[in-house]
Amino acid sequence: SGDRCVRANQPLPRPVRRKGTWGKSRPESILERLCQGARAVSRRGSDWRPFCAPHRRPDGSMDVTPRMIAYYEVDILDQSATTTSDSTTSFDPFPPILRTHTTECVAVGIATESFHIHTRMPGWDSRSFGYHGDDGGIFHSSGGMIERFGPTFGRGDTVGCGIDYVAQAIFFTLNGRFLGYGWKNIGVEFLHNDLYPVVGIDTNALIELNFG
């Protein structure tokens, strides 16, 4: 009951910053050669080296394309956390806590490792960014909404959050539709941190995360 988050146990993959240019060092592996072919993206005097996050295509082949965007999705399921498929009575050492108010909120975003997941939602401090489902607002560095960003969302919806390292921006999707960038020109120093998927949960609905 109340405001809290779940956080992935691993950060999203990210490109690596390095000084200099691609031509000064010889690639040491096929992956290095692929990344070299993709070219470095130069922003504000620093070069980003694309990362590879292998994933399986629908036809069964593997995609190892070097990329500059990290992305994940959250499915908010219609099923309630208090619903079980087993009708038999069993002892639960952690019985569900039912919310005492009717407004539900799922918030999707990213945060650094130092973000406190208890009593907070994504975007309520300077170490996190979030898009909130109850009002469609985006949040950063404050519990107050920065602006109305997109539609509200809830049970039955799929919300995506991505980091575009070329634009130095954070974007969101809703049910497969690109909503745009919530923030641009965030800054290299923040993006150089390990950034974790975080989902604020003030609901009894179950969530399921897809990392590719």
Image: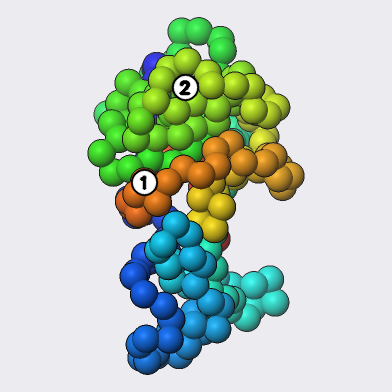
Task: Between residue 184 and residue 5, name the one nearer to us.
Answer: 184
Whether pointer 2 and pointer 1 mark residues with C-beta atoms closer than 8 Å, the reply is no
Residue type, mark 1 in image: Phe
Q: Earlier in the sequence, mark 2 or mark 1?
A: 1
Left or right: 111 as drawn, with respect to 159: left
- Res. 5 image quadrant: top left
Residue topped by disc 2: 202
Location of the N terminus (image quadrant): top left
Residue 57 at x, y = what percent?
A: 64, 72
**Residue 35 visible from this viewpoint:** yes
In the image, is residue 139 above or below residue 209?
above
Residue hosting label 1:
190
Which residue is pictured at 41% across the width and 62% down the height? Answer: 45
Residue at 51% from the left image edge and 50% from the top image edge:
168
Q: Position of residue 108 (x, y in %)?
A: 51, 35
Circle 2 — which element?
Answer: strand
Disc ID at residue 86: none
